[in-house]
Amino acid sequence: MMAQQIRQGIQKQQEFIPSYVETVEDTGLKEAFLEELILKDIYLANFTFGREIANRTHLPFKLVELILDGLKRQLFIEVRSSAGLGDYEFTPTEKGRNRALAFFEHSAYVGPCPVPWNIYVDSLKNQTIRREAVTPRDLEVAFSDIMVNRRTINSVGPAINSGRGMFLFGEAGNGKTSIAERIVRSFKGHIFIPYAIEVDGQIIRLYDQHNHQSVSAANYPKDYDHRWVRIHRPCVTVGGELTIEMLELQYDYTSKLYEAPLQLKANCGILLIDDFGRQRIDHRSLLNRWIVPLEKRIDYLTLHTGKKLETPFEQLIVFSTNLNPSDLADEAFLRRIPYKIHITNPSEDEFKWIFLQYCQSVGIAYNEEAVNYIIENQFRNGKRYMRCCHPRDLVDQVINLCLFLQTEPKLTKEYLDHACAVYFTAMGL
């Protein structure tokens, strides 16, 4: 009962909804900044209604009206027609076009109004990944479509709840990446992140559809600041292409905009470093980059102006590797990642279960006799080790062979022998 109360308390604290903005002061931005953003929006649209501007900038219509009145007084825009319901169609004047072009020289950003850096940082503290508290049942549901044994569940669960990260290591093909990617399914609730962040007049784009999965608008609360988007806790994955530069703010000198680094996009979620140790740069350089964030839970980012930004390092970092962690990092770093979880080869029963599940998923009849035949001829007596990926890959080979032969896909000894001959050739144990 006590554990359940603690869990419910954590989930309740975790909820964060950005307050609705009504005034310029509520946005945390200067009026001049809002004028710049809206004038650039009107310049690109050429002719546009006030409510359309509000939709694109994600600002309340009444606040947009206030800014439009100011732009009219400065003769930057003029009314072209009326749309009714207190709305009008606006177009930039010649003076407004010239001012907009000057604004574009400073920053090409047009879109959802950004949120100030300090407000974003405060939101991370309210939505920290350390407020997650998963149970064995949560992980069983999250891993329901893959084979994960009880030992692994009992190791991964505490690592998640610690919020300190983990190594998933072991032989290739046993589902380390699949396990890491499914951890996020065990998390409860959603978080809010801003579309973009403002700091010293500079814009950092944070939200992107590749790394962030937004929640249906039907589930949104009625009154909140729409400069924020409600998403599932993110799982940002990067593999062998990872470089040091990808962990820093990426400044585009043409658009004068920043793209957020991977760890900023992963805040309040998971950062998965897949196939660690196979990156194009020395893995020790990457490890050294994370020494301070893992120890202090604070990261430092640098603007192109030289200004340093201190930001919470609020994510669960997961290293997935085929190598032994002791071969990749020294004792000082391994101490900062206290959970090293060995993902082992499947047992025979687990191997058969994976075969059965995959056959069901692709619509081919499971043949236990044929599977036992393959186990006896390919894996017993130390011929080779079973891997969790073998059932999927061998069944796919059988299906492709049957498609070529124009026959109904069946899991027979003959077809599996053919699949093994092709699949295991030139492969070791």
Image (tube, rainbow, N blue to C red):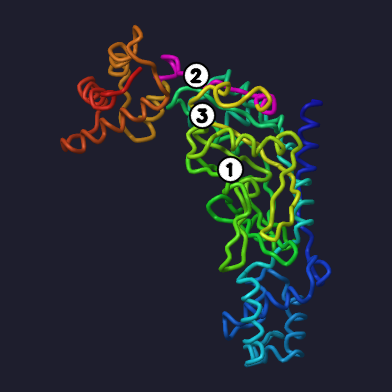
Tag on residue 235? 1
Identity, as a three-letter code, of the amino acid under mark 1: Cys
Q: Residue at x 65, y 73 (%)?
A: 106
In the rendered image, the vertical position of residue 150 relative to residue 54, given as above or below = above
The quadrant of the image that shows the C terminus is top left
Q: Which residues are magenta?
A: 334-352
Task: Spot the residue most to the top.
Answer: 381
| Residue 248 percent across, percent down from the top left | 62, 50
Identity, as a three-letter code, of the amino acid under mark 2: Thr
Q: Residue at x 15, y 35 (%)?
A: 405
Is label 3 or label 2 in front?
3
Q: Earlier in the sequence, mark 1 or mark 3?
A: 1
Q: CA distance from mark 1 to mark 2?
A: 24 Å
For mark 2, give the secondary structure.
Answer: loop
Q: Return the residue nearer the eye: 228 or 198.
A: 198
Q: Earlier in the sequence, mark 1 or mark 2?
A: 1
**Observer able to see residue 254:** yes
> Does 350 appear in magenta?
yes
Tag on residue 344? 2
Q: CA distance from mark 1 to mark 3?
A: 17 Å
Q: Quadrant of residue 80?
A: bottom right
Q: Return the residue nearer the eye: 233 or 353.
A: 233
Residues marked 1 and 3 touching at CB (< 8 Å): no
Q: CA distance from mark 3 to mark 2?
A: 13 Å
